[in-house]
Image (cartoon, grey):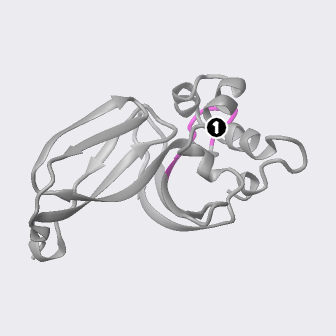
């Protein structure tokens, strides 16, 4: 994260090159498979918020033990203050590598952009337009009581899309 905050030090795109070097094979494949493709991909409006950001903080999440077929996984929720003064959240998943030459190293498995939206209870449909974006259509209601808070997670460096709807606090009891 520090490297991406100072992306062009000591050379242009040094921070993005560092991010690429610490990405696992699946993550690399999801963003084009080559450093050149990743550098182009990193200019998209969502991922670009990580480049040259002002500050960041992280909150360590769950750790999932290794299995016979994959290394251990861990998540970290990273909050970024963008260079435009906006706060953005990204869920980074790291996977411990099981085979040489990276055996024992933790590499980026995926990075998901997380944002909150206010949705009406009358969501007419939900669909994804590409493997990197989510579109939600909402039928507007006049009654402000007819709204629920939802959290949607949009893919940044993965082929997976997560959408999580969270009920309002009074409905959780």
| Residue at the image point whose x is 62% and y is 38% from the top | 23
The part of the image, by quadrant, that contains residue 67 is: top left
Total count of labels: 1
Q: Position of residue 127 (x, y in %)?
A: 25, 34
Residue 87 % position (x, y): 53, 65
On whether residue 116 falls in the magenta region, the answer is: no
Vertical side of 152 occupied by 18: above or below: above
- The quarter of the picture where residue 5 lies is bottom right
In the rendered image, residue 84, in percent from the top left (x then y), is placed at 63, 61
The quarter of the rendered structure image containing the C terminus is bottom left
Q: Residue at x 41, y 51 (%)?
A: 65
**Where does the N terminus fall, quadrant-wise?**
bottom right
Density class for disc 1 (Cα within 10 Å; few <14, some 14-19, many ≥20) is few
Identify the residue at horizontal 66%, vertical 29% (top origin): 40
Residue at the farthest front position: 142
Q: Is residue 112 above or below residue 145?
A: above
x then y, percent, for residue 31: 56, 29
Residue on which disc 1 sits: 43
Does 103 sit above or below residue 83? above
Question: 3 or 133, which lies in front?
Answer: 133
Q: Residue furthest right?
A: 10
Helix, strand or loop at mark 1? loop
| Residue range (magenta) | 92-103
- Left or right of residue 169, residue 155 in this image: right
In the depicted view, which residue is nearer to us: 163 or 75?
163
Rendered position, 142 above or below 49:
below
């Amino acid at each position: 994260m520090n490297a991406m905050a100072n992306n062009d030090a000591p050379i242009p795109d040094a921070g993005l090159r560092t991010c690429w070097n610490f990405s696992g094979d699946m993550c690399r494949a999801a963003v084009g498979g080559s450093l050149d493709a990743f550098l182009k991909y990193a200019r998209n409006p969502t991922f670009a918020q990580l480049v040259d950001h002002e500050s960041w903080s992280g909150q360590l999440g769950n750790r999932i033990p290794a299995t016979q077929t994959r290394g251990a996984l861990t998540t970290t929720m990273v909050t970024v203050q963008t260079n435009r003064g906006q706060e953005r959240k990204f869920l980074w998943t790291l996977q411990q590598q099981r085979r040489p030459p990276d055996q024992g190293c933790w590499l980026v498995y995926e990075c998901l952009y997380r944002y909150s939206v206010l949705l009406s209870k009358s969501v007419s449909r939900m669909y994804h337009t590409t493997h990197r974006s989510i579109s939600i259509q909402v039928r507007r209601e006049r009654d402000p009581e007819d709204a629920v808070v939802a959290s949607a997670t949009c893919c940044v460096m993965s082929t997976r899309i997560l959408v999580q709807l969270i009920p309002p606090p009074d409905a959780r009891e």
